[in-house]
Image (cartoon, helix red, strand yellow):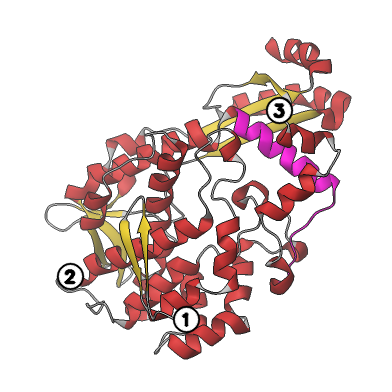
């Protein structure tokens, strides 16, 4: 069995995996990701969107190495340079494994885990299991599965605190990869941005207030990061919140609830569920909601609000919905697509301006300050009540 692996990727070219990464890739939790599509049922809207969480995981691993190398080359960096640096191997392993706990259909049905856990907790449980733990014991050479769990939970100390935001933070490799990958496979151009420029200007900036280094950018990279933010904004409006995609997502969740399907909180049982398993069950179901997906017989759009509802407009529309909910019950499918795609995370990306002053991205970028939150309602229903619902909401 080869000690390393090489993959040809449509986004990044050749992706090399070392001995540890190759062994991790061969495990059941990683191979299962080949059967979990990155974008749920989006391939029923954008036929090319057949790509999986597996390909995204490889891309994130590759980018984690690139970002680490950029940070490690900066004067005064707290990170050790070189391909065999322990921190580099750790952050690449974490990026590779960060999506292990995704349920079938990815984000489209992630609130159905037993015991109230989420996909991040399932990732931790899989990482703590014997299969992955055994791989780290054999090939980790100082990197352990517990280290990956701490990194993904942002519980590292000292200089390694810089590693967590590389994988999951305001300016992480997860976003960098999925925007380019989703854009390519959906056949759109909305998700493109200057990846090389973004990576080349990422810096380990020392924050005198906290006394720690933070992941930020030099001012010369500001416009490249703005292009990433705009790409994310348009991917949400044009792809992730697509009108037909949201209808299919609603039908999917209705069917899952109707069938009382949940995702097991036990890692071993969880590994048995993937998209193919669920689609097979759906094709055998005579449920209206299953047929809506398999036969493309989904409810029609009866009404949609504007894309940027103000809080009072949202409350007013919700008041108009109440009598319709009471009258039609589950005969109405209602989506509320809400997102701040220009806000990259809980923190703020610091921008180092000329003279060394650190300012938040929102202060440095006039463009980012003026982007508005996406907040839109859509109401779908069957042909039998379509005219009534449309008329009730048209005033």
Spatial CA distance of label 3 from label 2 is 53 Å
Q: Earlier in the sequence, mark 1 or mark 2?
A: 2
Residue receiving disc 3: 318
Residue 209 sits above or below residue 354 on the image: below
- Residue sitting at 63 percent across and 75 percent down? 125
Considering depth in this image, is 137 or 90 the residue closer to the camera? 137
- Pick whichever, 137 or 74, lies toward us: 137
Name the residue at 83% across, 28% down: 331
Residue 305 spot, x, y in % from top left: 60, 22
Residue behind mark 2 = 73
Residues shaded magenta: 244-266
> Mark 1 or mark 3, which is nearer the start of the sequence?
1
Taking 256 as reference, is 54 left or right? left
Alpha carbon of mark 1 to alpha carbon of mark 2: how far?
23 Å
Between residues 100 and 292, which one lies in front from this camera angle?
Answer: 292
Which label's residue is closer to the chain start, 3 or 2? Answer: 2
Pick the quarter of the image with the C terminus.
top right
Q: Tell me the quadrant of the picture where the N terminus can be found.
A: bottom left
Which residue does the image show at 42% across and 62% down from the upper left?
A: 58
Which residue reaches farthest left?
355
Task: Point out the frontmost of discs 3 and 2.
Answer: 2
Disc 3 or disc 1, which is closer to the eye?
A: 1
Q: Which mark is residue 158?
A: none
Residue that carries the numbered disc 1 in the rendered image: 147
- Which of the 4 image quadrants contains residue 204? bottom left
Q: Looking at the picture, how far across and down is residue 35, in whole percent?
A: 60, 57
Q: Disc 2 on helix, strand or loop?
A: helix
């Amino acid at each position: 069995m080869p000690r390393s692996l090489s993959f040809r990727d449509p986004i990044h070219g050749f992706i090399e995996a070392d001995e540890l990464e190759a062994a991790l890739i061969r495990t059941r939790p990683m191979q299962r990701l080949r059967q979990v599509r990155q974008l749920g049922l989006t391939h029923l809207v954008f036929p090319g969107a057949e790509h999986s969480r597996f390909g995204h995981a490889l891309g994130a691993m590759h980018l984690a190495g690139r970002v680490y190398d950029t940070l490690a080359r900066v004067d005064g960096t707290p990170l050790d340079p070189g391909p065999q640096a322990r921190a580099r191997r750790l952050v690449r392993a974490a990026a590779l494994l960060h999506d292990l706990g995704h349920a079938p259909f990815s984000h489209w049905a992630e609130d159905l885990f037993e015991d109230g856990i989420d996909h991040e907790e399932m990732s931790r449980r899989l990482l703590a299991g014997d299969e992955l733990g055994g791989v780290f014991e054999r090939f980790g050479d100082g990197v352990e599965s517990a280290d990956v769990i701490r990194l993904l939970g942002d519980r590292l100390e000292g200089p390694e605190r810089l590693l967590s935001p590389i994988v999951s933070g305001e300016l992480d490799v997860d976003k960098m990869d999925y925007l380019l990958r989703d854009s390519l496979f959906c056949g759109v151009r909305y998700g493109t941005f200057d990846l090389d420029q973004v990576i080349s200007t990422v810096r380990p900036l020392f924050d005198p207030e906290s006394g720690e280094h933070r992941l930020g950018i030099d001012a010369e990279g500001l416009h490249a990061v703005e292009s990433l933010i705009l790409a994310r904004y348009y991917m949400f409006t044009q792809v992730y919140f697509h009108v037909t995609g949201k209808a299919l997502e609603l039908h999917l969740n209705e069917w899952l609830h109707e069938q009382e399907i949940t995702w097991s909180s036990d890692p071993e049982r969880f590994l048995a569920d993937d998209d193919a398993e669920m689609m097979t069950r759906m094709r055998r179901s005579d449920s209206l909601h299953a047929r809506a997906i398999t036969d493309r017989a989904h409810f029609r759009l009866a009404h949609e609000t504007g894309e940027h509802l103000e809080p009072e407009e949202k409350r007013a529309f919700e008041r108009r919905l109440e009598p319709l909910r009471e009258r039609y019950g589950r005969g109405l499918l209602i989506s509320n697509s809400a997102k701040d795609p220009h806000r990259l995370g809980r923190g703020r990306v610091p921008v180092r301006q000329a003279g060394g002053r650190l300012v938040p991205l929102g202060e440095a970028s006039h463009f980012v300050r003026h982007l508005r939150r996406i907040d839109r309602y859509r109401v779908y229903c069957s042909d039998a009540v379509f005219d009534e619902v449309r008329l009730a909401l048209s005033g």
